[in-house]
């Protein structure tokens, strides 16, 4: 992925606007195969660190789905998903449970 587009994507993930954050997370599926291993690792680490601090239920689902997209393409290698364990239990709703279950071994520190 072009550096400029990648940096714009990272900026959108960090936006104060919930809709922009959600849209950025949803776009991962469109370009996941274009990411270098380093870009995927950095994006995955950032998403995992952002998820526990996400206040929007919809944006949280989009972040978890983005990680799932990375995983589906074999791009989670080296990504630290342990921060997902910091998501408050009260913030994990039914739509998040499938993702959390899928990442449980990574959250616990397993491979």
Image: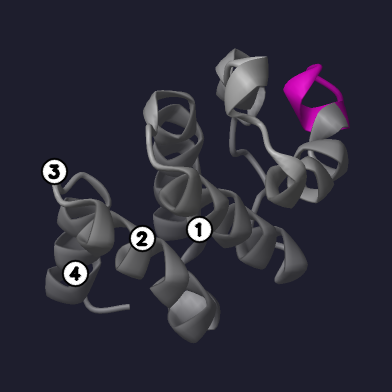
* Residue range corresponding to the magenta coloring: 105-110
Q: Nearer the viewer, residue 100 or 83?
A: 100
Marks 1,2: beta carbons within 8 A = yes
The answer to whether the residue labelled 2 contacts the one labelled 4, judged by CB atoms less than 8 Å apart, is no
Above or below for 99 versus 104: below
Q: Residues within 10 Å of mark 4 (few under 14, many from 20)?
A: few
The disc placed on residue 18 is none
Residue labelled with disc 4: 3
Q: Which residue is mark 1?
A: 62
Q: Which residue is mark 3?
A: 16
First in sequence, mark 2 or 4: give its number.
4
What is the CA distance from the residue labelled 1 to the residue labelled 3? 15 Å
Residue at 70%, 71% (x, y): give it.
73
Task: Point out residue 14 in the picture as x, y percentages from the top left corner.
Answer: 21, 44
Tell me if 108 is positioned left or right of 96 in this view: right
Asked whether the viewer can see residue 26, the reply is yes
Question: In what element is the residue under mark 1?
Answer: helix
Residue 22: give its label: 2
């Amino acid at each position: 992925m072009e550096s400029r587009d990648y940096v714009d994507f990272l900026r959108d993930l960090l936006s104060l606007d919930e809709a922009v954050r959600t849209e950025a997370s949803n776009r991962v599926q469109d370009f996941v195969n274009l990411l270098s291993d380093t870009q995927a690792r950095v994006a995955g680490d950032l998403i995992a660190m952002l998820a526990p601090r996400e206040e929007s239920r919809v944006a949280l689902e989009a972040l978890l789905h983005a990680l799932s997209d990375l995983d589906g393409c074999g791009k989670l290698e080296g990504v630290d998903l342990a921060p997902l364990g910091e998501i408050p239990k009260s913030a994990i709703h039914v739509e998040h449970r499938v993702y959390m279950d899928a990442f449980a071994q990574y959250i616990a520190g397993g491979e």
